[in-house]
Image (cartoon, rainbow, N blue to C red):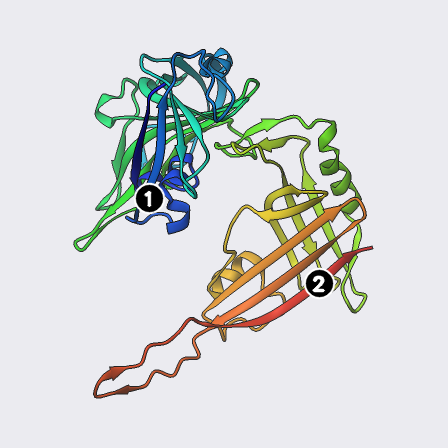
Amino acid sequence: MSAARTALRVSCAAAGALTLQATLAGCILGGQGTDDKFECPMTQRELDGDEAISPVLGLAPSDVLSWASSSRNVTARWNDPPAGITTSSTPGPVEVVVAVERARGVAVEVVPEEPCGPPHVRVPATVSFASADGQLDERVPGTLTVTREGFARVSADVEWDELHGAFEWRNAAPGVELVEPSVAIVLTPMATAGSFGAAVQTRTADAVSIGPGGGGRLLHWPADSACGSAQVEREPGEQDAIYADAVARADGRAWTDAQGAEYTLAITSGATLCESEDGAHSLPASVALRSPDGAVDLALDGWFVREDDQLQYRPSEQGLGGSPANFRERFGDFGLVLDDHEHISLELTVTLSSTGGHAALRVIGHRDDCEQRCDARGCSGCGPLTSIPLLEVSLQQR
């Protein structure tokens, strides 16, 4: 087995958000949709064949190829195109055949340095994906990446001018285009998820900006999965009983604040868990919270994630909030005066366990209280907006 030390240098704009490639590039630390680049020193070792065991992962490429090299029929969904783009595809469900094959080349064990992501094995692969509507009929070289037993990720770049299907896109707004098309697939022995898409590039007279790759997700599968395209659905086992038990114990029960007022917290969830590349499991769920007077009437989508013997709720949308008008349209005003602030943010935490639960709701106003002063040398700068708690509610499950 030969070894070499190298470094990966990747643009965060090209890597996109929350992918293994972006993690290896350090993009999670530096933000997304920017041109920041990060050096990631790593050691690479060529494996002596697919039967050779990776010393770091403790598995051989053949252990994964035995189930990952396969053809799978999935029901996918064409999404509405991004703003400023029109496509030849029709939004809605479509049957897709996805296949992964071992390609020529050597499997490589990669060990990045902290904090550039987990050790993994990369295997050359060929990716095929064809849609029943004829929009896609592609076969492209890619890479199968393995970070643990029973889970694989496949990625491949696509060239617009080399598509064999009928798919086409056009810009409906000046300067907006789709760049860096790719397909991303996650696999387990029993399930698959994935997407075909591109980054949205906006060109103006002064600059060119590229948004995160997820902004141009054109096709995804499974069509109606709450797990998204980077996680796979998994049936819960005996060790996962806490999800159903804790949710059933909390759903629809009275939750009281410090003054004894009773709030209602309703939880809507399915029975299927989502499994991610790092081995974590989560339960997709919607949480609705209502106060006795109806001033608080909030519903959010997200996931319950297990942490030891508790479930923590994480809304699917990060940074909940907006301008007063936008906040009021989405969430109501909670009986609060919002227009004195430039920005309103919302935080909801819910913790469930076998012994009960607690929740907290915070609404925070942010405004500019800076009095800028100017003299002959210039004007003084202002710091961040002043944050003012507008509503803080702490609840205990009865």
Rendered location of residue 385, percent (x, y): 44, 72
Q: Residue at x 44, y 14 (%)?
A: 52
Q: Is residue 148 left or right of residue 357?
A: left
Residue ID at (33%, 16%): 106
Distance from Cα at disc 1 to Cα at disc 2: 39 Å
Q: Is residue 85 visible?
A: no
Q: Name the disc covering residue 83, or none.
A: none
Q: Amino acid at mark 2?
A: Ser
Give the vertical position of 152 relative to 17 (above or below): above
Question: Which amino acid is tagged 1?
Answer: Cys
Of tags 1 and 2, the one toward the viewer is 1
Q: Secondary structure at mark 1?
A: helix
- Circle 1 is placed at which residue position? 12
Q: Quadrant of the N terminus?
A: top left
Total marks placed: 2
Please identify the quarter of the rendering in which residue 349 is found: bottom right
Q: Determine whether, in the image, residue 397 is placed left or right of residue 181.
A: right
The residue that label 2 is drawn on is 394
Residue farthest bottom in this picture: 375
**How far from the left and from the top, in percent, is residue 280?**
59, 35
Q: Quadrant of residue 291?
A: bottom right
Tell me where residue 98 appears, x and y as whole percent. Answer: 43, 17
- Please provide percent x and percent y for residue 39: 31, 43
Task: Answer left or right for 178 relative to 370.
Answer: left
Q: Determine the residue located farthest toward the left in the rendered image.
A: 205
